[in-house]
Amino acid sequence: MARALARQGAARRTGPGPLLVSGLALAIVVVAAISVGSVRVLPGAVLGALLDGVRGHHSGTVDTIVWQLRLPRVLLASLVGASLALAGATFQGVFRNPLADPYLLGAASGAGFGASVVLVFAGAVPWLAHVGVGWAAFACALATVAVVALLARQGRGLPAVSLILAGVVLGSSLSAATSFLMLAARDRAAGILSWLLGSFAFASWDRVAAMLPLLVPAVLVLLLAGRALDVMQLGDESAAQLGVPVEAVKLILLATATLATAAAVSVAGVIGFVGLVVPHAVRLAFGPRHVRLIPLSAVWGAIFLVLADLCARTVLAPAEIPVGIVTALVGGPFFLLLLRRQRSGS
Amino acid sequence: MSLEIRALRAGYGEQDVLRSCDLRLEPGEVVGVVGPNGAGKSTLVRVLTRRLPVRGGSVSVDGRPLDRFGRLELARKMAVVPQLPELPAGYTVRELVSMGRTPHLGLLRPERDEDRRAVEAALRTTDTLRLADRPATRLSGGERQRVVLARALAQSPRYLLLDEPTNHLDLRYQVEVLAFTRREVQRGMAALVVLHDLNLAASACDRLVVLQEGRNVAEGPPARVLTAPLVSRVYGTDVEVHALGTRPLIVPRFDRA
């Protein structure tokens, strides 16, 4: 019995099972999310419409609903969820701190500030309107994290404490600036706020296409980083003695994860808690090895955000709640629960 | 084939801690480095792990200067058991020991049969095989040190560097760590052990190097090196040395302290 349990435990940590099961769960959630909405499409019909589209002949309203409205939205939610969770898992691994995520280094407040500037001044400054909210958010998120890294740099190293301090301080300043913009341009405040809380209401194939070229390389890099992250959990010195170029790996991973986050934020706004909660839950369920944690976080991040978006658009239908509110309302208590379980478990 | 240190100078900031250190380590021997606090023992370890640059003199591994090795290449030659090893939460003993194969695999290549065999052998040597599927954070201090030693052995290094590996361990585990090391050395490895406890060093090492203010003051078999006048002078406190078979036994003299 004990041996069987041990074997089961070992399989949980090494076999291909978890990834298959998780992938299947994602497929089911995606079909379910496409089927639910103001017009109900039965799962069978969803599959039929998807097949029709793949074969290239669209016919009827169901195909239009599935292909033009629901699928891009569900896809975008899964891409954004996967990016945020992947980036969170990476940051937590690099900093060896379960509370780290790209938002902590100012990615969220930078993006929020960039978006607000465009929303407020686009009318007066034509080239800002041309840049658009998404690109402004993307650029400002990257710029903020880059400035934070420059401020925190000491010699060739990037000490975690100064990074996080610089991130929190610069982030607070940018949030203050965003609040000021909201007060100064009250007619735009609602727009800024809804952007800050995140939404997939404006999902489109264009946004999916905008996200993919950034996300695919980022995912590939992060998926390959599993062993480096695992060895780095031994501490910088031991990792270096095992031949890992620690500082270079850190820099590459932080840059890649930040890029993925900036891409996610630029198409969907600032959606909180995904990067924090999902890797935690995955770690509890499947163990701490990054070789496994990284891909599973991506899959469960997608599942979590597709479900959150489903809530966001159905709970008060026909009105929509910003999805960031759902993730915070669900994610917060869930995170506390995980913390308690972790404490009683170890 | 040897690790050779000649007239090594190294230190921090303006100050040289090691002024002129010589040391030669060959397969099949356990060499102990002893000396009072500040003598340069930790500095020596930092130079060998390339956290501190060589300021003067030379360090070569199998005839090649230390700074000419690639990271992975050096990690295949030399493994380190650090003074305060960290064992991350949640990982099992086997997962941690497997990380010792990183220098042979790089960051991307999947584990091969020979890697699994090396891990298995390291677990067996350190008597941690029965703990293999347990989370390492649940182990006692002595067991954890054995896991760290197993990780170093899984690296299949030629040179093993142990930086005060017996700190915070009770007698049984102190002896165990050094006994496992000796056993590996008999199979052709070489070990350099930094130790505080002179009696432990005298009984576990084939040769001792005594450092004082960054220089070698004595080198040779324990019985020849650890004489009462030398130990008293180097440590600045009176000791008696008794012969126990071929090994010296150092006893501090409290009446004259």
Image (spheres, coloured by chain):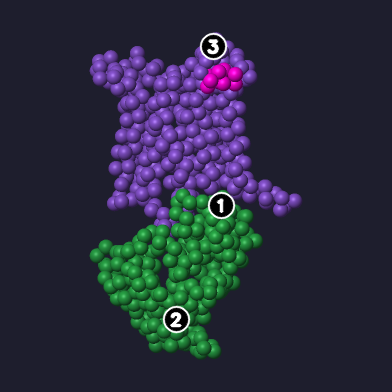
Chain colours: A purple, B green
Q: Numbered disc 3: what chain?
A: A
Which quadrant would residue A29 be assigned to in this image?
A: top right
**Which residue is located at x 46 percent, y 18 percent?**
A201
- Neighbor class of circle 3 (other Cα within 10 Å; few <14, some 14-19, many 20+) is few
For residue A238, which numbered disc appears in the image?
A: none
**Which residue is located at x 46 percent, y 73 percent?**
B191
Q: Which residue is mark 2?
A: B207
**Which residue is located at x 53 percent, y 72 percent?**
B184
Q: Numbered disc 2: what chain?
A: B
Select label 2 or label 3 by which is in front.
Answer: 3
Q: Are marks 1 and 3 on the same chain?
A: no
Relative to A121, say whether A81 is above or below: below
For residue B91, which numbered disc appears in the image?
A: 1
Magenta residues (range):
A47-55
What's the magenta bit mostly, secondary-structure-wise?
helix
Which quadrant would residue B24 be assigned to in this image?
A: bottom left
Q: Are marks 1 and 3 in contact (CB under 8 Å)?
A: no
Identify the amino acid type marked 2.
Arg
Image side of residue B162 versus residue B4, left or right: right
Image side of residue B172 versus residue B14, left or right: right
Identify the amino acid type marked 3.
Ser
